[in-house]
Image (cartoon, grey):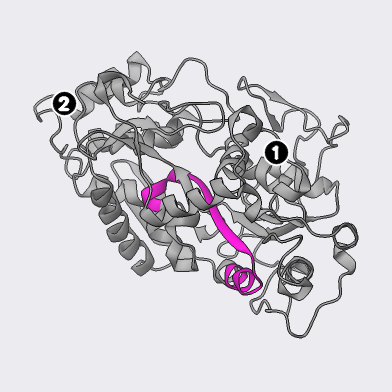
Amino acid sequence: MRLRRAITPTIIRTTATLAAAAALAAAPSAAAAAAPADTTDNIHATAAHDNCPRLTTDWYGANRERLQQVIDAYGTCYGGRHHGHRPVAAFDWDNTITKNDVTDATLAWSLKHDKILRPARWKDTSAWLTDAADRALTEACGTDVPVGAPLPTSTDTDCTDEIFEIRENATTMSGAAAFTGTWNHRRTVPQYAWVPQLFAGHTVAELSSYARQARTEALAAPVGTTQTLGTHTIPGYVRYYEQQRDLIRTLKKAGFDVWIVSAGSEPVTEVWAPGVGVDAAHTVAIRSVLDRRGRITTYNTGCGDVPVNKGTAIPYIDGKRCWINQEIYGVHGAAAWKKQNRAHRIVIGGGDADTDVTFVGDAVGAHLVLNRNKAEIMCRAYDDADGRWVINPMFIDPLPRKADPYPCSTTAYNEPDGGRGPVRRDDGSVVPDQKDTVYGPEAATSS
């Protein structure tokens, strides 16, 4: 395959990842998570086994016990495999496994250390960047620096401000829209896709190095630390959630395959994932395409029936389902966007935001949600249509109770065209508005 401007679509993956992908292609059902019908129908009644790997950290209410029941039912205590298949758990990364966003931490570090290279035209960095954003970035970042050379963002706070405002709010510093055009709002969001595109011209090794240095800095900063980028104040620290580290460790001991599926930059996520025992072969995020020199381009790999593109299909809402179906279960083409049968769905899914609602909802054993007051996923969680939703406050600095009910019956659903609509169950019925009940620093934990 050859892209315009003679870009050869070399996908960012490690040797281990390619080997794993080949194995899955040869036997696409090898990662399937199908438990016997009597087990899945009575998951909450499953008795714990003394010889099962045990969760040891504190969770809200009975959540630890509920998760343990699923581990016991699908893991080694039930024989380790089901019809010859290993069970799968998949988790979002930012604010699910860690407190705070590791891609933002890497971008912030890069801006503070002059690691963003000047593009020939800012419009080339995104298929949707507006003329207003192009002008704002050109004016703020200037044209004195040669194309392909580092921008002095550590000292040029106007340039830093424009870049981070577009990343954070999809607007320029003057308030103009930064992106325009048409995209499927359940498959991508331009400002998420834009971050890997900002690193065009770098090698994967260089970006990984920036992520490692940002990781060291963020883990060393005390909890609650902030940092300033231009006029923006953002979190200056990141922490692994010990409860999630313990959950992943326990799942792996119980025979689960554990995957990370993130809407961040894949080289960045791959730097962080080993901290919870997940390797690059089990890490999926936005995969940039490399040019012939091995440097990152503004293109990324596609999913399902979507080919190489400039951000059209990333692991975002329905895109996370597509990537799980394709990378874990070997489902290709248009079918990868569809909900699969139980044998080809994850057992446990974990997330914190609407970006995760589809794949978390696909799980057959437990839908784990960290409450960040995101409407669509919290509507699903509180409605609890199948009795398998597990809601937990954030483990560090949890949010207080949301004062108003979630608008599930009217505007909580993210429509593909960018509109808002009611959240519906599988039978088409509308989910009623839901009150926020799992929240706050006073939330009780299990002993």
Q: What residue do we see at 72% from left, 80% from top?
A: 52
Q: Quadrant of the N terminus?
A: top left
Q: Where does label 1 land, which residue?
A: 376
Residue 438 visible in image: no
Secondary structure of the residue carrying numbered label 1: helix
Q: Nearer the viewer, residue 438 or 107?
A: 107
Cα distance, mark 2 to mark 1? 41 Å
Q: What residue do we see at 25% from left, 20% from top?
A: 5
Residue 309 visible in image: yes
Label 1 neighbourhood size at 10 Å, few (<14), some (14-19), many (20+)?
A: many
Type of the residue with mark 2: Gly
| Residue range of the region highlighted in magenta in the rendering | 246-268
Quadrant of res 214: bottom left
Q: What residue do we see at 75% from left, 72% from top?
A: 79
Instruction: Give above or below for 224 relative to 163.
Output: below
Q: Is residue 85 magenta?
A: no
Front label number (2 vs 1):
1
Label 2 neighbourhood size at 10 Å, few (<14), some (14-19), many (20+)?
A: some
Q: Where does label 2 land, which residue?
A: 142
Quadrant of res 447: bottom right
Q: Is residue 267 magenta?
A: yes
Q: Nearer the viewer, residue 432 or 336?
A: 336
Instruction: Give above or below for 159 relative to 61.
Output: above
Position in image of residue 361 (x %, y %): 73, 45
